[in-house]
């Protein structure tokens, strides 16, 4: 009886999620004639234009990680440690809400403010757009990590005579670290594969892995390399999620 | 220290919503371009009302989103009900990947499958593409808001209510708000979805985000593609998004606390 | 849970007492039909109910978290069991009214209230009314007082006892709190690790515990090493704090000397902790009697008790 209720859900996911991914893997290992090959993967690392795009995207990701971290960390500390319950509720809702708003909308909104300050499509606009969009993905894991710390921890440390620097380095940072790590992985992966913001705000600097996949599949009819890239991104994500899942389980979430 | 952090946090929060505010202001901008403000005007909204393509886009987005919301929540409800309060590591491991895998990879995979089987790309493929993500998301939402109330169901049973009666009088009324919230959020995610739609649509079928995207790629070619005309099309999308997203966040957070 | 066999006596309150996780709630759920036993049977009046679903058993159950329906008013909660039985709305109204009055809630004040507006004690009463209104054959209570203040708990325990006497309903009450068990039980079942250690009338279990575990679960006990005449090796015996006399005037079977280490004022009773040969013994003395003794911390005292008051000698190996 119970199994029967699970069936429609599993069938749907099977046909429209797991089957497509199986096919994706299949195409990544075959050439145009349907013969088995590693060529698509080798091509990514051999062809300088692909390799450049991957390296460029990595660089962009690292930059976005660093900037989101700097921007989100103080806010996460405030909300998790200092805010009273009323402030915390409001701020949490405010920082979580953007999660559910599509990137196209947020990227376009960002464009409005960038143009107002006369920042046109290009590297700076793209980075600002990415930081704006991924800020909540850095904020939330750090907040969650910090909120696991015992409630009166900071007061206790201060009563025991710790100065602010000691509180930050000895008390807050150890708790925040798993969250920072999780946020960095999330933001890195998402901005690595992101496509809308680079295309809309990046101008000539917007050719990242996401844009490359889009071009290969929809414009260039290059299914082999396109699917190989998608498979790599997927594997990276799954690996990161499993790694984070392990870590989070240790923390009891 | 505390005061400084507090000020920073609230400024950051304001910054998160500032772009949207600029967007709304610009939709009332007499000038067609975003660069400067040239007096208030309703011209872009008047234009939007005459915009047949936009109306078609809104309509298509709406029907796809409604179907996807209802379908995904129905499937997810059955699954969440069957799972109940138990730990189902294997099942969860199958249900969560659609949420975490980058959307573009999922979009590419669906694109390839639909092409391989020679499906006619359009409303149905777009709706299915959205649902493949939504169904997992609805499942997670319903697990959080709750569709099983073991103790209350037990109480109803000992008071003499059979399985069906318990479902109708206890489970349904208590799960109902969560179900509504799940439908609303999956509706929203589908209504505003862009990437998945881009890869799963076919010639002649477009949703509102696709239409805006295409117009944004050739700004100022005609009146409809002026940036501030696009802002006016975005405004209802933003307002719908914000209201559903806030309602969802507040509701799920209150449930988590319980 | 294994080898548990329990016969509950009609018309009395049986308290199942044991530490958390000992299987007492599972036992209750098996009686209610909410958990199916892997093996074994559930009989009501000699009839096999093992396969009867919970809704057909005619039981009333009060759950640990009360499980009141949060989306219904007080009235609808109490009426639920009657409505699913197809009772006419007119009769429902009068019976809900009676049930609320029975548990001490004024129907005109409480009927339309929401559950979340009620205090813990009031919710408790609603839960009781809801399970009694269907006139169950058996009333099952699963740690229903777990979240209540001491005073309210005492009052409600008294009322449950009064209602049970009034209705003559067979009741099984599960708790880990021996004070609750003391104040409400006719019969006591002491459970541990899924096994029944002892089952009998309350006083019998207190006076003649079959093992040291029972002696210390149900009431306080000092554990002492002892040698037994005629049996090899040493064992432990238990002596209740109130059975020890300080500076006894009459001749007693066992007498030790010791030094008072601490005095704990408990109101009507004083607990005197005495160190005897490296063991600490707790002695309970009535307040007035204590003042007559005139001992303080550091006083040398003699302790004595009757051999017939020693419990749990059977546990000796």
Image (cartoon, rainbow, N blue to C red):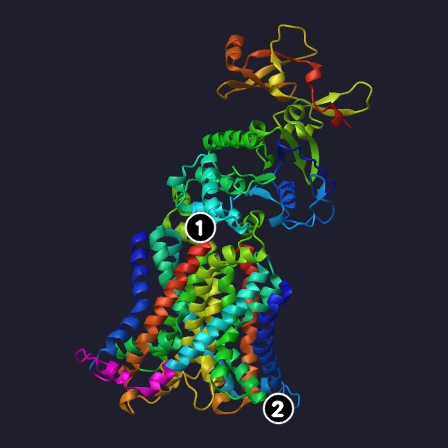
Residue at the spot x=66%, y=22% of the render? C207
The span from disc 1 to disc 2 (Cα, nearest Å) is: 64 Å
Residue A31 numbered tag: 2
The region drawn magenta spans B31-58
Number of numbered discs: 2
Residue at the spot x=60%, y=35% of the render? C171
Residue at the spot x=60%, y=82% of the render? A23
Q: Does C296 sit above or below residue B79?
A: above
Where's the C terminus of chain C, which quadrant? top right
In the rendered structure, the residue with mark 2 lies on which chain? A
Indicate the position of residue C241 as horizontal and vertical percent values: 61, 20
Q: Does C120 sit above or below residue C257?
A: below
Q: Name the residue under label 1.
A: C72
In the rendered structure, the residue with mark 1 lies on which chain? C
Q: Badge 1 local density, few (<14 within 10 Å), some, or many (20+)?
A: some
Q: Is residue B99 visible?
A: no
C313 vs A145, left or right, is: right
């Amino acid at each position: 009886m119970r199994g029967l209720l699970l069936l429609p859900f599993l069938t749907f996911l099977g046909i429209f999620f797991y089957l497509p991914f199986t096919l994706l893997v299949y195409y990544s290992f075959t050439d145009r004639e349907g013969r088995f090959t590693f060529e698509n993967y080798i091509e990514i690392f051999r062809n300088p234009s692909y390799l450049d795009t991957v390296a460029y995207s990595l660089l962009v990701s690292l930059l976005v990680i660093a900037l989101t971290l700097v921007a989100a960390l103080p806010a996460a500390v405030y909300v998790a440690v200092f805010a009273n319950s009323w402030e915390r509720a409001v701020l949490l809702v405010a920082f979580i809400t953007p999660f559910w708003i599509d990137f196209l909308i947020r990227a376009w909104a960002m464009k409005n403010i960038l143009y107002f300050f006369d920042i046109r499509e290009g590297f700076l606009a793209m980075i600002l757009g990415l930081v704006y969009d991924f800020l909540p993905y850095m904020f939330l894991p750090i907040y969650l990590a910090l909120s696991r710390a015992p409630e009166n921890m900071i007061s206790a440390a201060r009563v025991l005579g710790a100065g602010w620097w000691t509180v930050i380095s000895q008390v807050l940072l150890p708790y925040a670290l798993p969250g920072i790590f999780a946020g960095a992985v999330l933001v890195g992966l998402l901005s690595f594969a992101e496509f809308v913001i680079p295309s809309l705000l990046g101008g000539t600097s917007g050719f990242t892995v996401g844009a490359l996949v889009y071009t290969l599949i929809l414009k260039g009819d290059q299914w082999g390399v396109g699917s190989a890239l998608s498979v790599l991104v997927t594997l990276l994500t799954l690996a990161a999620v499993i790694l984070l899942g392990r870590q989070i389980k240790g923390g009891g979430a | 220290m505390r005061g400084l952090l507090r000020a920073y946090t609230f400024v950051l929060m304001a910054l998160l919503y500032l772009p949207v505010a600029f967007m709304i202001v610009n939709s009332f901008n007499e000038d067609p371009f975003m660069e400067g403000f040239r007096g208030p005007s309703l011209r872009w909204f008047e234009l939007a009302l005459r915009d047949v393509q936009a109306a078609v886009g809104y309509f298509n987005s709406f029907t796809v989103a409604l179907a996807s919301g209802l379908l995904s929540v129905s499937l997810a409800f059955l699954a969440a009900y069957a799972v109940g309060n138990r730990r189902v590591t294997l099942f969860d491991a199958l249900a969560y990947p659609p949420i975490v895998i980058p959307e573009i990879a999922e979009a590419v995979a669906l694109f390839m499958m639909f092409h391989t089987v020679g499906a006619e790309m359009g409303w149905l493929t777009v709706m299915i593409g959205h649902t493949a993500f939504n169904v997992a998301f609805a499942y997670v939402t319903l697990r959080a808001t709750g569709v099983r109330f073991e103790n209350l169901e037990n109480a109803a049973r000992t008071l003499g209510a059979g399985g069906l009666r318990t479902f109708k009088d206890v489970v349904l009324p208590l799960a109902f708000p969560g179900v509504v919230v799940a439908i609303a959020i999956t509706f929203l995610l589908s209504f505003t979805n862009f990437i998945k739609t881009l890869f799963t649509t076919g010639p002649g079928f477009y949703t509102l985000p696709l239409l805006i995207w295409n117009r944004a790629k050739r700004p100022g070619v005609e009146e409809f593609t002026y940036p501030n005309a696009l802002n006016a099309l975005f405004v209802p999308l933003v307002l719908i998004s914000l209201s559903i997203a806030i309602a969802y966040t507040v509701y799920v957070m209150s449930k988590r606390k319980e | 849970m294994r080898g548990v066999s329990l016969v509950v006596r009609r018309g009395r309150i049986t308290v199942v007492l044991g530490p958390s996780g000992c299987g007492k709630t599972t036992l209750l759920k098996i009686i209610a039909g909410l958990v199916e036993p892997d093996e074994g049977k559930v009989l009501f009046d000699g009839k096999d109910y093992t396969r009867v679903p919970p809704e057909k058993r005619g039981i009333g159950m009060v759950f640990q978290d009360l499980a009141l329906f949060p989306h219904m008013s007080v009235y609808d909660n109490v009426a639920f069991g009657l409505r699913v039985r197809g009772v006419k709305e007119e009769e429902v109204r009068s019976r809900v009214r009676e049930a609320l009055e029975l548990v001490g809630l004024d129907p005109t004040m409480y009927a339309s209230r929401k559950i979340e507006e009620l205090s813990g004690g009031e919710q408790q009463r609603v839960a009781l009314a809801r399970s009694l209104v269907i006139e169950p054959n058996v009333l099952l209570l699963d740690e229903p007082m777990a979240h209540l203040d001491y005073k309210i708990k005492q009052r409600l325990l008294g009322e449950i006892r009064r209602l049970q006497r009034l209705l003559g309903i067979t009741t099984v009450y599960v708790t880990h709190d021996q004070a609750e068990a003391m104040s409400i039980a006719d019969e006591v079942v002491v459970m541990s690790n899924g096994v029944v250690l002892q089952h009998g009338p309350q006083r019998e279990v207190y006076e003649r515990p079959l093992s040291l575990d029972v002696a210390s679960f149900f009431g306080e006990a000092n554990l002492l090493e002892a040698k037994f005449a005629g049996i090899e090796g040493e064992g432990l015996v238990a002596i209740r704090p109130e059975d020890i006399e300080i500076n006894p005037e009459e001749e007693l079977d066992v007498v030790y000397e010791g030094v008072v280490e601490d005095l704990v004022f408990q109101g009507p009773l004083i607990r005197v902790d005495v160190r005897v040969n490296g063991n600490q013994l707790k002695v309970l003395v009535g307040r007035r009697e204590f003042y007559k003794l005139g001992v303080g911390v550091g006083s040398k005292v003699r302790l004595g008790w009757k051999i017939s008051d020693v419990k749990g000698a059977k546990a000796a190996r």
